[in-house]
Image (tube, rainbow, N blue to C red):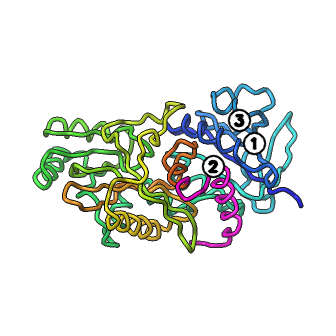
Amino acid sequence: MAKIKAAVIFGGTAREHALSLASAAEVIKNIPRDTYEVICIGITRKGRWLFFPGSPEEIADGTWEQNTDCTSAFISPDPLHRGIITIENGETSVKRIDVVLPILMGKKGGDGTIQGLLDLSGIPYVGSGVLACGSCMDKSHTHMIMDDHNIKTPEWALITQRELSELDKKCTEIADRFGCDLVVKPAKSGSNQGISFVKDMEGFLTAVKVAFSNDNKVIVEKYVHARKLEVAVIGYDNLICSPVGEIIASDKIYDPSDFNVSSGDDLTIPANITPETAKKAKEIATTAFKALGCKGMARVDLFLTDDGELLLNKIGTMPGLKSTSVFPKLMEQLGYDHEDLIDMLLEQAVENSDRNY
């Protein structure tokens, strides 16, 4: 039987470039070769697309771009091609693809842009579609959809660029509502870049300006003293929910520009919570997953406040896929090793490719 041609897209122009490389290198090593033929497509930090025929080790250490066998390549938006077009010495050729695993985090990757291209191409792909990725990346949309579905989140407010001329007034109004113990963040960011914790009005104004340097909308949340819980959700119609984990190092800031970054290093599974709290956390995770239109997989971050209330923090539609990352470690608790997990993600993407939701 012919092998399934699986393309892995990695790299990208976002700050999470190195995290993408680290995840992709491990994923490529763990794709079952008896079932799949792997095609690697890398995107440089400057946005150049390259067909990469080298080893996962070159991806892991960031030297893949220097491989002399790399050639220009891109996903064709024409469904007639259903694959990638490579360009070498002025000659073009088409490589057919059966399924794509886009391992791209942050802007121009995890925000729906790559997903839109893949929708045009007609090629099945792992993970959520354009609208779900965009809504999860834009935290103002996440908040609004959660409010609509009665899922509690930290109290929040939005500041847009149009309000910059009255920034002092806007910030004063927010401080009057929430106080000055706040979290200020860019609305659209896949990492911790531009996020500030503030305690006073002067710091608040500075934090808003920092956040605006990263995006055109800023989210302000009332600071919540809480434990950080994690749930992995996978599937389409019948969702699978992992046991609930907990990130213990609550004040640690992860830098996705570091090749070795893995928030899974501080993950404890299962979280030391009651069975009732664990059940509720899973219910919130799956409800939010469905409300946002997610499919395939997601990492759901929750807060457990000091008085026992569960709040949704965020949903990552393209979680890190290193074996030591949160999502794979949570799924491992259900008996899925790294190879099984990647195989299942690819298989489900092909089986559910005709579902438009």
| Tag nearer the camera, 1 or 3 | 3
Q: Amino acid at mark 3?
A: Pro
Q: Position of residue 132 (x, y in %)?
A: 49, 62
The mark nearer the N terminus, 1 or 3, is: 3
Disc 2 packing (10 Å; few <14; some 14–19; many ≥20): many
Disc 1 packing (10 Å; few <14; some 14–19; many ≥20): many
Residue holding disc 2: 338
Q: Amino acid at mark 2?
A: His
Contact? badges 2 and 1 (CB < 8 Å)? no
Residue at the spot x=15%, y=53% of the render?
178
The mark nearer the N terminus, 3 or 2, is: 3
| SS under mark 2 | helix
Residue holding disc 3: 56
4 left or right of 159 in image? right
227 left or right of 65 in image? left
Q: Residue 155: which quarter of the image?
A: bottom left
The answer to if 152 sits in the magenta stretch is: no
Q: Amino acid at mark 1?
A: Ala
Residue at the spot x=34%, y=73% of the render?
149
Relative to residue 57, is residue 350 depicted above or below? below
Q: Residue 43: which quarter of the image?
A: top right
Q: Position of residue 296 (x, y in %)?
A: 58, 62
Q: Position of residue 245 (x, y in %)?
A: 41, 53
Disc 3 packing (10 Å; few <14; some 14–19; many ≥20): many
| SS under mark 3 | helix
Residue at the spot x=52%, y=39% of the render?
14
Q: Is residue 289 visible?
A: yes
The mark nearer the N terminus, 2 or 1, is: 1
Give the residues in magenta. Answer: 332-357
Q: Quadrant of the N terminus?
A: bottom right
Q: Position of residue 71 (x, y in %)?
A: 78, 35
Residue holding disc 1: 73
